[in-house]
Image (cartoon, grey):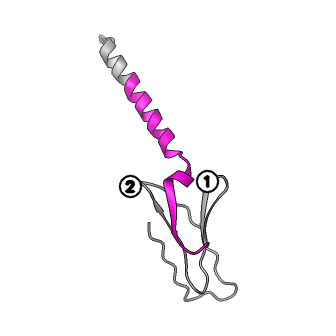
Amino acid sequence: MATYPCPPNSLTLLLITSLVMVGSLMVVAGNIYQDVDITWGDGRGKILNNGNVVTLSLDKASGSGFQSKNEYLFGKFDMQLKLVPGNSAGTVTIFYA
């Protein structure tokens, strides 16, 4: 079976495509201070840990929220909930993404 080397133009195209993909990954790891706005919550929404964590809290009066400044095709959210001590049956939680 014969093998054919890649023409120089194909190698250049592969290199450029790889650089664009690496550049796209760097955009994803941006600064959250520039990427989101705390839209409501009167101080209950905070950006912590050098922009790596967004905390949203809820009290008896209201909750909090944030909004991305850009639109994305996909993303990942991790969430932790702290329930009331004791019997928390009937607690309703909603997470909109």
Q: Quadrant of the N terminus?
A: top left
User: What residue sits 36% from the left and 17% below the top?
Assistant: 11
User: What residue sits 44% from the left and 56% below the top?
Assistant: 69
Pointer 2: what residue?
Answer: 71
Badge 2: how crowded within 10 Å, few (<14), some, or many (20+)?
A: few
Report if residue 41 lies within the magenta region: yes
Q: Nearer the viewer, residue 51 or 77?
A: 51
Report the magenta residues as a range.
15-43
Q: For residue 47, which quarter of the picture?
A: bottom right
Residue 6 against residue 43 in the figure, above or below: above
Q: Nearer the viewer, residue 79 or 52?
A: 52
Q: Secondary structure at mark 1?
A: loop
Q: Amino acid at mark 1?
A: Gly
Left-right relation of 8 to 64: left
Q: Amino acid at mark 2?
A: Glu
Q: Position of residue 87 (x, y in %)?
A: 65, 89
Q: Quadrant of the C terminus?
A: bottom left
Q: Which mark is residue 7?
A: none
Pointer 1: what residue?
Answer: 51
Marks 1 and 2, Cα distance to the nearest angstrom? 19 Å
Residue sticking out furthest to the front: 42
Q: Secondary structure at mark 2?
A: loop
User: What residue sits 58% from the left and 75% below the top?
Assistant: 42
Left-right relation of 18 to 80: left
Q: For residue 10, which quarter of the picture?
A: top left
Q: Is residue 77 visible?
A: yes
Q: For residue 7, which quarter of the picture?
A: top left
